[in-house]
Image: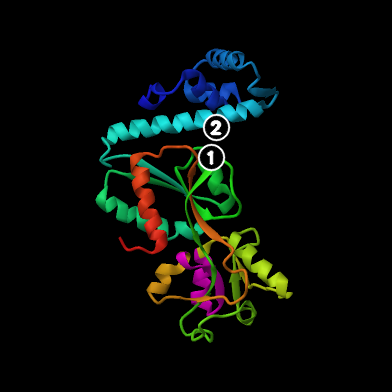
Amino acid sequence: MSATNQLQDTALRYFLEVARCGSVSLASQRLHVAMSAISRQIAHLEAQLETPLFERHARGMVPTAAGDILTRHARRISLEAEQAVDAIHALANLSAGAVRIATSDAFANQLVPAVCARFQQDYPGVRFEVLMCPTAQVPVKVLAGDADIGLCFSLAPVKNIHVVHRQSAPVVAILPPGHALARRRQVSLAELTRYPLALPPAETAVRQVVDMACARQELALEPVLVSNHAQTLLKYVQYSGGVSVSSEVSVRHLVASGELLAKPISDAGMDLRDIEVQTLGGRTLPTATEAYLAQLIAGLKGDKG
């Protein structure tokens, strides 16, 4: 049995695995524990709490409202146990540990790996797990305990998510050097429509901001390229001489190197998005994660250290 398991209550550990798997049989396989033992522990919990924790169906088990509450509690205990074991093993000096990050495409391409590389120069024993997923899934991964840190554009407040850091992320126009609009201090959406336009899909936060501004003006967008991969959009701009939209932080390194230009967009509403750094509400983070969090926030702000 691992040290983490030893620090967790057996009944809660069995309960959480059933909630994750949706069945006692799958939980039995993953825990290497007899199904009868798992069922007894869950029955004991239900007797103690005087309420059913699962709805039992032919296809599996689904937590009840009470079960959902206990699931969140059990996840928090599990994460706290991992944190305690990591802190003990690392002896609080960042000689070991893991940092798990869920982030959207815009940050996974450059910012997150750059911060990871800088962090490892000082703490080579720390390892990283970076999960790239759609913006809406980032807080879901944090809530489920699959990630310690979430980094994404904000869509709406999420219950039980703590926003450690928030900063404005206005949408900017992306142009290649030498473009006809390159000398302009700022550009408008109407001006961008005159050139080959590459955009993210409609469900993304940046596209929603742009679409709302266009709707107010009855301005039709007809992109020649739509992609959910930020690098595809940026490379298209470089190769075609076309234009795109993004956030400043997503293209900061390319602007600094002179590969692309970023221009403010003059239309109202381009500043309605924020970047959020998220953690699970009420959770104490492992030592390595806390230290990485500080460097990540500095990277978002554009600090060089």
Q: Which residue is mark 2?
A: 72
Seen at 53% across and 84% down, the residue is 181
Identify the residue at the far right of this view: 218
N-terminal of the pair, mark 2 or mark 1, is: 2
Residue 99: x and y in percent read: 38, 44
Task: Please give the range of residues in magenta.
Answer: 231-249
Evaluate whether residue 22 shows in this view. Answer: no
Residue 143 is labelled as 1
Residue 20 percent coordinates (x, y): 56, 31
Per the model, the C-alpha gap separating discs 2 and 1 is 8 Å
The quadrant in which residue 290 appears is top left
The answer to whether the residues at label 2 and label 1 have Cβ atoms under 8 Å apart is yes
Q: Amino acid at mark 2?
A: Arg
The quadrant the N terminus occupies is top left
Q: Is residue 69 left or right of residue 292?
A: right
Q: Residue at x 59, y 71 (%)?
A: 198
